[in-house]
Image (cartoon, coloured by chain):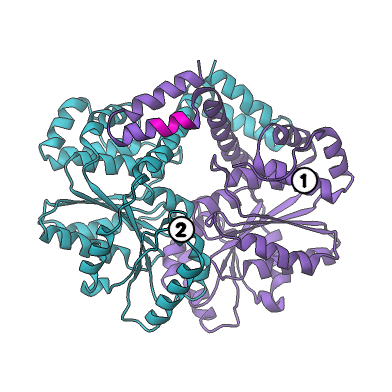
Chain colours: A purple, B cyan
Amino acid sequence: MKGTGPTIRDPRSTIRKIRSGDVRALARALTEVENGGAAAAELLRGMFPFSGQAWRVGITGAPGAGKSSLVDRLAAELRREGKTVGIIGVDPTSPYSGGAILGDRIRMQSHASDPGIFIRSMATRGFLGGVARATADVALVLDAAGREVVLVETVGVGQDEVDVVKLADVVAVLLVPGMGDDVQALKAGILEIADVLVINKSDREGADRLEQELRAMLEIAHRPDGWAPPIVRTVATEGAGVAELLAALRTCRFPGRAVSNWKARLLEMLRERLMERALQTGLSNGELEAVAAEVAERKRDPYRFVEEVVERACR
Amino acid sequence: MKGTGPTIRDPRSTIRKIRSGDVRALARALTEVENGGAAAAELLRGMFPFSGQAWRVGITGAPGAGKSSLVDRLAAELRREGKTVGIIGVDPTSPYSGGAILGDRIRMQSHASDPGIFIRSMATRGFLGGVARATADVALVLDAAGREVVLVETVGVGQDEVDVVKLADVVAVLLVPGMGDDVQALKAGILEIADVLVINKSDREGADRLEQELRAMLEIAHRPDGWAPPIVRTVATEGAGVAELLAALRTCRFPGRAVSNWKARLLEMLRERLMERALQTGLSNGELEAVAAEVAERKRDPYRFVEEVVERACR
């Protein structure tokens, strides 16, 4: 699924521009990276050695939990400290949704005057399925571009979202009072990824009950690494609790996470690269279409066909 | 991620047993298939020619929407018609959750006396990421085993869930009154997959408002194929509206869906097979671990490494 951005002819000069703070070059590069392909690969190779400096914070939670407001407040707080910030908004659940784009425009306005905040929305999902890959690459470029903090905002706690936020150094999961059943339903998903639990809209009725539920949950279910996520209350729209959240996030240190994250990422990169190769060397879209039709009529064995394609690609 | 079931030594005789209605052989085969591997591949090859007969219905919706109750009611309704039913419960969002298993036990009890209903829960997610692949294979085996209807129940409308239900011939999305913002948030996801919209717990306050919101949504946003999903009201716990839902599901005919589904499935099978091959021939877990550590310290280029692994696997 290729995007519309112009292809970058000279990755080296683009990298120089990005490193020197050229925001338009950065935006073009991110489009390239999001789309994937050869130029993107060269860009990423060139940017990689400069990466590894940024503090990457993932923020996730159900729709309507107030992620964007909280991310904006966190960004403002970080700016007050003089930190440069990159924000990545990801919405992998709705390929048809313009939500992220719209939110992007609105937020661009509020931060337009501040070059210290760079916002990137990713509403698209690659044909090869790599929203996690694309987000990780975009974060890497923002990191290598010198952004001191990269905030990654994603909706929900589905597997896609888990994969997306796993690239972060620390992850905050937002909850709001009055979710009812959902705490139970989300429990496993939350515990898998939450380093910090945030009760946003905590001025609402039910905040105490939610906190009790979360504490009860944390007493029964424990994380493999033994970390007990702190619970922070916020009212993002008013900025309440944001400084406390930032402090809580900074208490999170997970040695070994960078390695396990890279492990998962290498596998994802490998998966995507193998598919690219198979589709280039072994399988045209026309053939795929034709074979799918034969398989649907049980005139062809899909399992044998897949083996054939693998052999073609890996001759 | 291998399961615990015993490996099947003689796929041919297993297939004969399954075809003759041996439920224990079916259960063993499904475990094998869910785990993947060589024996599973042979089983699937053998079962494939017998598949393509079942009517596959996907049912999805947010946690607490009442999917299980509705699926049980649909199954009971189908049994009254004398149809044999297979039920697959999938919960890809919570790898740590025993929810599906628990639900399975409870439901097994209520249907224990009826061999016409076979229930299979899939709470696990394969290491190679193939819950969609595994579910599709399990559905194929139930189909080839002679189940006339296969009901696939999955939580949420994230990408994983979309991939899971895409294997179905028709998909119902459950909503409940009082979701508020969520309708907006879910809009794109719902429209992508819903052939029938179900307002469950429709005896609750807000059912009319929800229906109005859905109708308004359907007037603005249209599906690429032009289909306007009917809206059906149910109260699953009482069985209200279940017959109407079944009738609505039966009005759904989508020529070409089988082909597009197989297209997506072939790509998923290819993705998984390529990874298996790469991990067998090109990359050990120990090396992956070591390289991830070097990459995390920026001592190694992950992009070049992935290329190397591809070359090794596809020499």
Residue B196 appears in the rendering: yes
> Which chain is indicated by disc 2?
B
Q: Main secondary structure of the magenta part?
A: helix
Disc assigned to residue A28 = 1
| Nearer mark to the viewer, of 1 and 2 | 2
Please, is residue B152 above or below residue B284 in the view? below
Identify which residue is drawn at 35% across, 30% down.
Answer: A302
Dot 2 surroundings within 10 Å: few (below 14), some, or many (20 or more)? some
Q: Residue at x 17, y 37 (%)?
A: B25
Dot 2 corresponds to which residue?
Answer: B223
Toward which corner of the image does residue B9 lie, by quadrant?
Answer: top left
| Amino acid type, callout 1 | Arg
Residue A82 in picture, x, y percent from top left:
86, 61
Residue A244, percent from left and from top: 70, 70
Amino acid type, mark 2: Arg
Secondary structure beneath disc 1?
helix
Magenta extent: A286-290
- Residue A152 lies, with reference to residue B244, above or below; the image says above
Residue at 69%, 45% in the rendered image: A4
Where does residue B315 sit, x and y in percent of width and height?
55, 15
* Letter of the chain that mark 1 sits on in the rendering: A
User: Most extreme residue toward the front, as rendered?
Assistant: B226
Quadrant for the N terminus of chain A, please: top right
Element at label 2:
loop
